[in-house]
Amino acid sequence: MDRSHPALTGTHVLPSVMSSDMLRLGEQIDALAAAGARALHVDVMDNHFVPNLTVGPDFTAAVARAARPHGMLVDVHVMVERPGNLIPLFAPHADAISVHVEADPHPHRLLGAIRDAGLMAGIAINPGTPVEALSALVPMIDYVNCMSVNPGFAGQSFVPQTPAKVRLLRDVVGDGVVIEVDGGVGPSTIDGVRDAGAQWLVSASAIFGSDDPIAAYGDLARGARGE
Ligand code: DX5
Ligand code: ZN
Protein backbone atom coordinates (compact mmCIF):
# COMPACT_ATOMS: atom_id res chain seq x y z
CA MET A 1 0.00 0.00 0.00
CA ASP A 2 1.32 3.39 -1.06
CA ARG A 3 1.36 5.54 2.09
CA SER A 4 1.39 8.70 -0.02
CA HIS A 5 -1.95 7.81 -1.62
CA PRO A 6 -4.22 10.91 -1.81
CA ALA A 7 -6.97 9.11 0.14
CA LEU A 8 -4.67 9.18 3.17
CA THR A 9 -4.65 12.98 3.35
CA GLY A 10 -7.73 14.99 4.26
CA THR A 11 -11.32 13.74 4.44
CA HIS A 12 -12.85 11.59 1.69
CA VAL A 13 -16.20 10.14 0.71
CA LEU A 14 -15.92 6.46 -0.24
CA PRO A 15 -18.81 5.39 -2.48
CA SER A 16 -20.01 1.96 -1.38
CA VAL A 17 -20.67 0.03 -4.57
CA MET A 18 -23.20 -2.22 -2.78
CA SER A 19 -25.96 0.10 -3.99
CA SER A 20 -24.56 0.83 -7.45
CA ASP A 21 -26.03 -0.34 -10.72
CA MET A 22 -23.68 -3.34 -10.82
CA LEU A 23 -24.16 -4.00 -14.53
CA ARG A 24 -22.95 -0.46 -15.20
CA LEU A 25 -20.36 -0.32 -12.46
CA GLY A 26 -17.39 0.31 -14.76
CA GLU A 27 -19.03 3.45 -16.17
CA GLN A 28 -20.00 4.60 -12.68
CA ILE A 29 -16.45 4.12 -11.38
CA ASP A 30 -15.07 6.12 -14.34
CA ALA A 31 -17.53 8.93 -13.61
CA LEU A 32 -16.84 8.93 -9.86
CA ALA A 33 -13.10 9.09 -10.54
CA ALA A 34 -13.66 12.02 -12.90
CA ALA A 35 -15.68 13.71 -10.14
CA GLY A 36 -12.72 13.36 -7.76
CA ALA A 37 -13.34 10.10 -5.87
CA ARG A 38 -10.04 8.65 -4.69
CA ALA A 39 -11.34 5.50 -2.99
CA LEU A 40 -14.16 2.95 -3.21
CA HIS A 41 -15.73 0.73 -0.54
CA VAL A 42 -16.87 -2.85 -1.21
CA ASP A 43 -19.14 -4.68 1.27
CA VAL A 44 -18.70 -8.44 1.62
CA MET A 45 -21.49 -10.22 3.55
CA ASP A 46 -21.90 -13.90 4.42
CA ASN A 47 -25.45 -14.38 5.81
CA HIS A 48 -23.91 -15.51 9.12
CA PHE A 49 -22.12 -12.55 10.67
CA VAL A 50 -24.75 -10.32 9.04
CA PRO A 51 -28.18 -11.27 7.68
CA ASN A 52 -27.40 -10.56 4.04
CA LEU A 53 -25.30 -11.97 1.21
CA THR A 54 -23.25 -9.93 -1.24
CA VAL A 55 -20.07 -10.34 -3.25
CA GLY A 56 -16.86 -12.35 -3.33
CA PRO A 57 -13.31 -12.12 -4.70
CA ASP A 58 -14.33 -12.28 -8.39
CA PHE A 59 -16.36 -9.13 -7.89
CA THR A 60 -13.58 -7.27 -6.06
CA ALA A 61 -11.25 -8.30 -8.90
CA ALA A 62 -13.63 -6.60 -11.36
CA VAL A 63 -13.83 -3.50 -9.17
CA ALA A 64 -10.05 -3.35 -8.96
CA ARG A 65 -9.73 -3.62 -12.77
CA ALA A 66 -11.99 -0.58 -13.11
CA ALA A 67 -10.58 1.40 -10.17
CA ARG A 68 -6.82 0.89 -10.52
CA PRO A 69 -6.39 2.72 -13.85
CA HIS A 70 -7.70 5.78 -11.99
CA GLY A 71 -5.41 5.19 -9.02
CA MET A 72 -8.40 4.70 -6.72
CA LEU A 73 -7.91 2.90 -3.42
CA VAL A 74 -10.12 -0.20 -2.99
CA ASP A 75 -11.34 -0.72 0.59
CA VAL A 76 -12.93 -4.13 1.23
CA HIS A 77 -15.17 -4.39 4.31
CA VAL A 78 -15.44 -8.06 5.23
CA MET A 79 -18.60 -8.81 7.23
CA VAL A 80 -17.93 -12.53 7.53
CA GLU A 81 -17.54 -14.89 10.47
CA ARG A 82 -13.99 -16.27 10.80
CA PRO A 83 -12.78 -14.44 7.66
CA GLY A 84 -9.17 -15.68 7.72
CA ASN A 85 -9.45 -17.90 4.66
CA LEU A 86 -10.70 -14.99 2.57
CA ILE A 87 -7.83 -12.58 3.21
CA PRO A 88 -5.48 -14.12 0.60
CA LEU A 89 -8.36 -14.27 -1.90
CA PHE A 90 -9.25 -10.58 -1.55
CA ALA A 91 -5.71 -9.24 -1.06
CA PRO A 92 -4.71 -9.06 -4.77
CA HIS A 93 -7.72 -6.82 -5.50
CA ALA A 94 -7.63 -4.58 -2.42
CA ASP A 95 -5.53 -1.83 -0.88
CA ALA A 96 -7.26 -1.96 2.50
CA ILE A 97 -9.24 -4.73 4.19
CA SER A 98 -11.28 -4.40 7.37
CA VAL A 99 -12.46 -7.35 9.44
CA HIS A 100 -14.84 -7.17 12.40
CA VAL A 101 -13.51 -7.39 15.94
CA GLU A 102 -16.70 -9.32 16.80
CA ALA A 103 -16.28 -11.92 14.02
CA ASP A 104 -13.23 -13.90 15.12
CA PRO A 105 -11.51 -14.71 18.43
CA HIS A 106 -8.13 -13.84 16.85
CA PRO A 107 -8.39 -10.35 15.35
CA HIS A 108 -4.70 -9.71 16.13
CA ARG A 109 -3.72 -12.59 13.85
CA LEU A 110 -6.06 -11.40 11.08
CA LEU A 111 -4.68 -7.86 11.16
CA GLY A 112 -1.16 -9.29 10.91
CA ALA A 113 -2.19 -11.37 7.88
CA ILE A 114 -3.64 -8.28 6.16
CA ARG A 115 -0.45 -6.29 6.79
CA ASP A 116 1.73 -9.20 5.68
CA ALA A 117 -0.17 -9.12 2.38
CA GLY A 118 0.98 -5.50 1.99
CA LEU A 119 -2.39 -3.87 2.67
CA MET A 120 -3.78 -1.41 5.18
CA ALA A 121 -5.21 -3.42 8.07
CA GLY A 122 -8.59 -2.25 9.33
CA ILE A 123 -10.69 -3.30 12.28
CA ALA A 124 -14.44 -2.76 12.03
CA ILE A 125 -16.51 -2.24 15.16
CA ASN A 126 -20.26 -2.55 15.50
CA PRO A 127 -22.39 0.17 17.12
CA GLY A 128 -22.90 -2.04 20.21
CA THR A 129 -19.21 -2.81 20.81
CA PRO A 130 -17.30 -0.50 23.17
CA VAL A 131 -14.17 1.27 21.90
CA GLU A 132 -12.10 -0.46 24.60
CA ALA A 133 -12.42 -3.69 22.56
CA LEU A 134 -9.74 -2.22 20.26
CA SER A 135 -7.20 -1.02 22.81
CA ALA A 136 -4.93 -4.10 22.71
CA LEU A 137 -5.00 -4.12 18.89
CA VAL A 138 -3.80 -0.54 18.33
CA PRO A 139 -0.25 -1.43 17.19
CA MET A 140 -1.78 -3.66 14.47
CA ILE A 141 -4.38 -1.20 13.17
CA ASP A 142 -4.01 1.14 10.17
CA TYR A 143 -7.70 2.13 10.15
CA VAL A 144 -10.86 1.64 12.16
CA ASN A 145 -14.20 1.17 10.43
CA CYS A 146 -16.61 2.64 12.98
CA MET A 147 -20.03 1.29 12.01
CA SER A 148 -22.74 3.91 12.21
CA VAL A 149 -25.48 1.34 11.45
CA ASN A 150 -25.78 -2.31 12.43
CA PRO A 151 -24.05 -3.91 9.43
CA GLY A 152 -25.97 -5.86 6.82
CA PHE A 153 -27.96 -3.43 4.72
CA ALA A 154 -27.64 -0.14 2.92
CA GLY A 155 -30.24 2.53 3.56
CA GLN A 156 -30.48 2.27 7.36
CA SER A 157 -30.69 5.20 9.77
CA PHE A 158 -27.49 6.66 11.17
CA VAL A 159 -26.86 5.79 14.83
CA PRO A 160 -26.79 9.25 16.45
CA GLN A 161 -24.15 8.38 19.07
CA THR A 162 -21.55 7.86 16.30
CA PRO A 163 -19.79 11.27 16.39
CA ALA A 164 -19.23 10.85 20.16
CA LYS A 165 -17.88 7.33 19.54
CA VAL A 166 -15.49 8.63 16.87
CA ARG A 167 -14.05 11.05 19.45
CA LEU A 168 -13.62 8.20 21.97
CA LEU A 169 -11.97 6.08 19.28
CA ARG A 170 -9.50 8.84 18.49
CA ASP A 171 -8.41 8.81 22.12
CA VAL A 172 -7.91 5.02 21.93
CA VAL A 173 -6.12 4.74 18.57
CA GLY A 174 -4.22 8.05 18.39
CA ASP A 175 -3.63 10.31 15.40
CA GLY A 176 -1.81 7.94 13.07
CA VAL A 177 -4.84 5.71 12.45
CA VAL A 178 -7.51 6.55 9.85
CA ILE A 179 -11.06 6.54 11.23
CA GLU A 180 -13.77 5.50 8.78
CA VAL A 181 -17.50 5.89 9.42
CA ASP A 182 -19.83 3.50 7.60
CA GLY A 183 -23.60 3.64 7.33
CA GLY A 184 -26.26 6.31 7.09
CA VAL A 185 -23.81 8.98 5.94
CA GLY A 186 -25.64 11.60 3.90
CA PRO A 187 -26.26 15.33 3.71
CA SER A 188 -27.82 15.53 7.18
CA THR A 189 -25.18 13.46 9.02
CA ILE A 190 -21.90 14.22 7.27
CA ASP A 191 -21.06 17.38 9.21
CA GLY A 192 -21.18 15.57 12.56
CA VAL A 193 -18.81 12.77 11.58
CA ARG A 194 -16.43 15.15 9.79
CA ASP A 195 -16.31 17.47 12.79
CA ALA A 196 -15.68 14.47 15.06
CA GLY A 197 -12.51 13.76 13.05
CA ALA A 198 -13.48 10.84 10.82
CA GLN A 199 -11.47 10.82 7.57
CA TRP A 200 -13.16 8.15 5.41
CA LEU A 201 -16.90 8.61 5.08
CA VAL A 202 -18.63 5.66 3.41
CA SER A 203 -21.90 6.24 1.59
CA ALA A 204 -24.09 3.95 -0.51
CA SER A 205 -27.71 5.08 -0.72
CA ALA A 206 -27.09 8.82 -0.46
CA ILE A 207 -25.03 8.46 -3.67
CA PHE A 208 -26.47 5.57 -5.68
CA GLY A 209 -30.05 6.08 -4.50
CA SER A 210 -29.99 9.56 -6.00
CA ASP A 211 -31.27 10.35 -9.49
CA ASP A 212 -27.82 11.77 -10.22
CA PRO A 213 -25.23 9.73 -8.28
CA ILE A 214 -22.29 11.76 -9.54
CA ALA A 215 -23.83 15.06 -8.45
CA ALA A 216 -24.76 13.48 -5.10
CA TYR A 217 -21.17 12.30 -4.69
CA GLY A 218 -19.94 15.83 -5.46
CA ASP A 219 -22.24 17.39 -2.86
CA LEU A 220 -21.13 14.91 -0.20
CA ALA A 221 -17.45 15.33 -1.09
CA ARG A 222 -17.79 19.09 -0.59
CA GLY A 223 -19.46 18.38 2.76
CA ALA A 224 -16.57 16.09 3.70
CA ARG A 225 -14.16 18.94 3.01
CA GLY A 226 -16.30 21.34 5.04
CA GLU A 227 -17.19 23.46 2.00
C1 DX5 B 1 -23.67 -1.67 5.76
C2 DX5 B 1 -22.45 -1.51 4.89
C3 DX5 B 1 -22.30 -0.14 4.38
C4 DX5 B 1 -23.43 0.27 3.46
C5 DX5 B 1 -23.72 1.71 3.70
O1 DX5 B 1 -23.65 -2.88 6.40
O2 DX5 B 1 -21.28 -1.82 5.60
O3 DX5 B 1 -21.05 0.09 3.75
O4 DX5 B 1 -23.14 0.06 2.10
O5 DX5 B 1 -24.93 2.02 3.11
P1 DX5 B 1 -25.68 3.39 3.40
O6 DX5 B 1 -24.74 4.50 3.07
O7 DX5 B 1 -26.86 3.32 2.50
O8 DX5 B 1 -26.04 3.37 4.85
ZN1 ZN C 1 -19.29 -1.19 4.66
Image: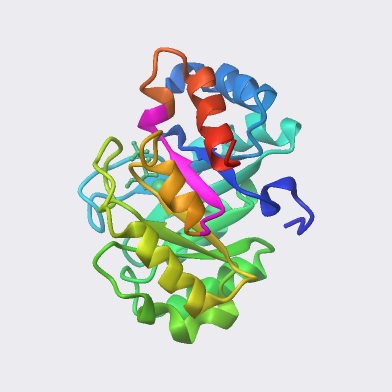
State left or right for residue 192 relative to residue 115. Answer: left
Residue 78 position (above or below residue 73): below
The x, y position of residue 203, in whole percent, is 43, 38
Residue 211 position (above or below residue 166): above
Query: Is 92 or 33 nearer to us in this picture?
Result: 33
Q: Which residue is drawn at 34% across and 79% down?
A: 105
State left or right for residue 35 relative to residue 90. Answer: right
Query: Is 45 or 170 nearer to us in this picture?
Result: 170
The x, y position of residue 166, in whole percent, is 43, 64
The x, y position of residue 174, in whole percent, is 58, 76
Let me know if residue 189 is in the magenta part.
no
Let me know if residue 199 is in the magenta part.
yes
Residue 148 position (above or below residue 114): above
**Quadrant where ligand 1 appears:** top left
State left or right for residue 182 relative to residue 69. Answer: left
Query: Is 55 or 120 nearer to us in this picture?
Result: 120
Q: Which residue is drawn at 48% across and 79% down?
A: 172
Start-end of magenta stretch: 197-206
Q: Which residue is drawn at 75% across and 31% down?
A: 69
Q: Residue furthest bottom?
A: 136
Q: Residue furthest top?
A: 211
Residue 94 appears anywhere in the view: yes
Q: Which residue is drawn at 65% across and 33% down?
A: 67
Q: Which residue lies furthest to the front in this view?
A: 227
Residue 56 appears anywhere in the view: no
